[in-house]
Amino acid sequence: MMPSKKRPFKKISIIGLGLIGSSIALAIKKKKLAEITSGYSRSLKTRTIAKKLKLTSEIKNNISDCVKNSDLVIICTHLSSYKSIFKKISPHLNKDAIVTDVGSAKESSISEVESLIKKKINFVPAHPIAGTEKSGPKAGFAELFEERWCIITPLKGNKTRDINKVKTFWKKLGSKVETMTPSRHDKVMAVTSHLPHLIAYNMVHTAADLENFTKSDIVKYSASGFRDFTRIASSDPTMWRDVILANREAVLEMIGRFSEDLSAIQKSIRWEDGDSLYKLFSKTRIVREKIIKAGQDTSDADFGRSKRK
Amino acid sequence: MMPSKKRPFKKISIIGLGLIGSSIALAIKKKKLAEITSGYSRSLKTRTIAKKLKLTSEIKNNISDCVKNSDLVIICTHLSSYKSIFKKISPHLNKDAIVTDVGSAKESSISEVESLIKKKINFVPAHPIAGTEKSGPKAGFAELFEERWCIITPLKGNKTRDINKVKTFWKKLGSKVETMTPSRHDKVMAVTSHLPHLIAYNMVHTAADLENFTKSDIVKYSASGFRDFTRIASSDPTMWRDVILANREAVLEMIGRFSEDLSAIQKSIRWEDGDSLYKLFSKTRIVREKIIKAGQDTSDADFGRSKRK
């Protein structure tokens, strides 16, 4: 990539080159947002693939070289490695460098690194609401963030200028940007993302465990509803372990609510209360209509599944 | 449609013209399987649309006219109307006419009409594992059953010739045909279809009920996982009320298993047992791979959702 003075950032570093990191790298390249992009992954395999795919203009074997002289550092790793990453990068950051992330849970990850941040690191947390069930450096694509939301959860010490730079960055990637507190972010995500993933994992787990049917029967007839759950239940297990534990309190609260509601349905079924079931099943239909109207999903039948094979 | 002596059936009647009935009608027309097709719906609105769309060669205002002289009658209505339909059509059926259906729960619907059937009606129950979240006569399309499974659950009194005719019918519609007992069908469907639908309905219900967030926030950020659930939770509420009640025992058993598994996850989260969560989240990924390998879903990321709007 040839240096160009018109680009909004001189050097952007991307720490972690999975689905999100590689997509950001490709989007920066496509939109020409930086003169230099530097990539780092602790995995040699990932670094090799990243080089081959030319995700960034350089791939570094150590994290300090990667972040050196950057004006923007984007952490795209699992939440459980934040503490160690902040420690490692802290001595090598420029005074004005902005550090941001893409983590799906905010409060606990922020409080974990807060002592390290103090006033030395300009950390502006962010979370792009985008992704697929695929993971790894080959899964990325430049269009992943287009027309998707990105939530910025500024910290008290953040400079307005830094917050605005992160906002602009995501807008340039094609995202719609929203700001909220880390605590509100975590509660909204507990309902819209963390609980659904957990329920999908559990649904697939329950079905797969049933030994009185052969597993192939469950796979064979999965098109009758079950297969929908298997998509999000095939998301990156390390990421989801970390997210669920990081947002533990809110997730436990949501499981509680879900279980209460399920018990009520269970009772309606046991007592053959068709009216309650009908009312419930009608209500949920309206939510789907709202989501389609808000442009958050396709209105095509069956998600417009490309081919019925 | 001009009569033709080469077609496998002289007259096929379709009772109920929703998603499945209208799709069968269009598929019969496309594949030229009958000289005459006759359609009936108890709803005037549906009959009017069906006429306009030319779903069948004739649309009848009463069910007895519809089934008269048919060699194949396909019941495509909600399960709760079976009893009344069997009573009404019974006196008007030809001796050799085969009656079949498309119901998603078998044991209880069969036992409900068994006294009416006795030896007078040649009832060969069937269940095509196909559908979308849309309903009504406009939702149908001729290709719905192609490469999908259809399960036939023959009754003891069924003639082999009649079973084979129903099998051949579904194969001509493009389906792969499997035979099993009504009881096994219901157990397999409880896991692969009925529980997933119920869980999706419950998930959407729990989220929609949360009043401490505005509902628009849940809709707004639904792309983070929640929206997947809203698709099947927007399926026909009458159909699902009937199916869940008809397969009550098996469904209650499955809810029990699901709840146990969810409690175990809840405990792992509370005690921050990351290893258990990781193990669970890894296991479910394999199920997805099997489903894709079996040709039961697309391998495209995000179901290949047509457009990110």
Image (cartoon, coloured by chain):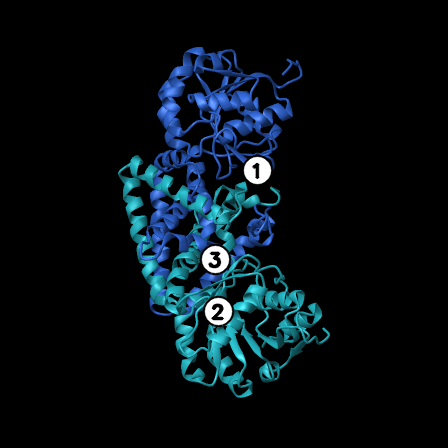
Chain colours: A cyan, B blue
Q: Name the residue nearer the viewer: A129 or A273.
A: A129
Asked whether residue B177 appears in the rendered view, the answer is yes
Is disc 2 surrounded by few (<14), some (14 to 19) or many (20+) residues within 10 Å? many
Asked whether residue A81 appears in the rendered view, the answer is no
In this figure, which residue is indicated by the disc labeled 3?
Answer: B224
**Residue most toward the right?**
A2
Identify the subunit bearing mark 2.
Answer: A
Q: Nearer the viewer, mark 2 or mark 3?
A: 2
Element type at marker 3?
helix
Q: Nearer the viewer, mark 1 or mark 3?
A: 3
Name the residue rendered at 46%, 66% in the picture.
A104
Type of amino acid under label 1: Arg
Residue at mark 2 shares a chain with residue at mark 1: no
Sequence-wise first label, 1 or 3: 1
Name the residue rendered at 56%, 51% in the picture.
B309
Q: Which mark is residue B148?
A: 1
Is disc 3 surrounded by few (<14), some (14 to 19) or many (20+) residues within 10 Å? many
Identify the subunit bearing mark 1.
Answer: B
Q: Name the residue nearer the viewer: A123 or B120.
A: A123
Distance from disc 2 to disc 3, alpha carbons, whole Å, reads: 15 Å
| Quarter residue A8 falls in | bottom right
Question: Residue A193: percent from the left, percent from the top?
Answer: 44, 58
Whether residue A160 is situated above or below residue A306 in the rendered picture: below
Name the residue rendered at 43%, 65% in the picture.
B277
Whether residue B166 is situated above or below residue A104 in the rendered picture: above
Identify the subunit bearing mark 3.
Answer: B
Type of amino acid under label 2: Ala
Element type at marker 1?
loop
In this figure, which residue is indicated by the disc labeled 2?
Answer: A126
